Amino acid sequence: MHGLPRNQLICKKEGSRDQLQKWCKWKSRVSKEASSSEANPVSSYSSVLFKLYGNVYPDGFYFAQVNVGQPPKPYFLDPDTGSDLTWLQCDAPCVHCTEAPHPLYRPTNDLVVCRDPLCASLHSGAYECPNPEQCDYEVEYADGGSSLGVLVNDVFSLNLTTGIRLGLRLAFGCGYDQLPDVYTPPLDGVLGLGKGNSSIVSQLHNQGIVRNIIGHCLNATGGFLFIGDDLYDASQVNWTPMSRDSTKHYSVSSAELTFGGKGVGIKNLDVIFDSGSSYSYLNSQAYRAIISLVEKDLKGKPLKADRGDRTLPECWKGRKPFKSVHDVRKYFKPLGLSFHHGQRVRTQFEIPPDAYLIISSKGNACLGILNGTEIGRQNDNIIGDISMQDKMVIYDNEKGAIGWSPADCNRPPKSNTFIM
């Protein structure tokens, strides 16, 4: 692909090669505050907590502030359950970097070597090591964006729900060549929260810091993200098993689409929960069914299609501009996905109008569910940020289940601190 040759070292190293820091796999360097606290031992399991900022519309993205380096510097990262690798735009030097809120990350000389298991997890099957001292990576996203770079190690300053702040050495991507998609948010990089060994979740779990569980709670102004298991009561959560067929995504099989609480004849949908997607997507058949049902249900109501509003493919205007979804929700029925597991067990994922509509700058109500087949998502059905608002959504990699429950996303429950 484009960019620097694969065998070119990214950093100007001073001194001999043996002065490079050796990376000690899974060995955490914990801050004095954490190691001196016997009241809150890390081994008792708590959660790493991040405050989230942003919205579905008009910004179109959420982000977490992550502090990296010694001394720590802030970076705004896109929390993405649809990908594994965390990466920062990087001055290595940078060949192509997109607009970002902070100066580019300047890498240390602490490189992940090519034959490290973390490097292997980023490649499928056998791979070559033209330069054994570094791990080259390239990640490509469904929307057409990509990042090219090398893996490095540095210290992440992380807040635990117990009030402890940890300094942990983690591996991540130093991205020196980014190819933007049609709409690339002005952020410093991506916080990869997927299932793979390279994800921050897996690294923290393998260091014994947290359980292999993540969760998020999104609303119109931000929310919070956590890695661990102490912010929810599992008995109060609606659970459904993850699909065993998908090793890359957080997905669920055998979903039935509902409208107004009733099935619409669209069954056996494979559904991906993806926090890196602002909107939700259905395959062509399911999408056309929903459009038909919504349009039929709107007949006789004071709404009509506005083809002049290009905010999203389907928008409706009222007698006067709407100020919020609250003004228009009474005209729309709830959608839902009914997940079947076991002979008679069903778990319902409710999608009220607030979780599938936005109000455009023209004051119209627009449908935040799109035709995924038309934009190259083939048969994928994706639950994006818009449909996960005002819910705590939990991805339990230990039990192989996804869960959700209604929640106030302004402040995490049961946490001693919410400092970022």
Image: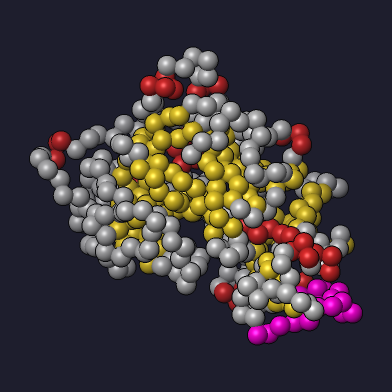
**Numbered range of the magenta stretch:** 291-308
Q: Is residue 71 left or right of residue 189?
A: left
The image's colouring method is: secondary structure
Q: Observer-nearest residue: 266 or 374?
A: 374
Q: Is residue 42 visible?
A: yes
The front one of 252 and 16 is 16
Q: Is residue 42 above or below residue 395?
A: above
Quarter of the image with the N terminus in it: bottom left
Q: Residue at x 53, y 19 (%)?
A: 40
Give residue 147's position: percent from left, percent from top. 37, 60
Please tell me which residue is depicted at 24% across the width and 62% down the height of the picture: 4
Farthest residue toward the left? 15
Q: Quadrant of residue 269?
A: bottom right
Tell me if residue 376 is in the magenta stretch.
Answer: no
Report the residue that reaches farthest toward the right: 300
Asked if 51 appears above or below 356 in the picture, the reply is above
Total number of numbered labels? 0
On the question of residue 117 being in view, the answer is no
Residue 201: x and y in percent read 50, 40
Image position of 4 (left or right of 241): left
Q: Which quarter of the figure has residue 92?
A: bottom left
Query: Which residue shows up at 66% across the image and 34% down it?
Result: 413
Q: Is residue 301 magenta?
A: yes
Please identify the residue farthest to the bottom as the structure is shown. Answer: 308
Q: Is residue 410 above or below residue 360?
A: above
- Percent x, y of residue 168: 39, 32
Residue plotted at (65% across, 76% down): 362
Q: Residue 10, how many percent across, how many down?
A: 22, 53
Which residue of the protein is positioned furthest toward the top in this rendering?
38
Query: Front-most of 241 and 187?
Result: 187
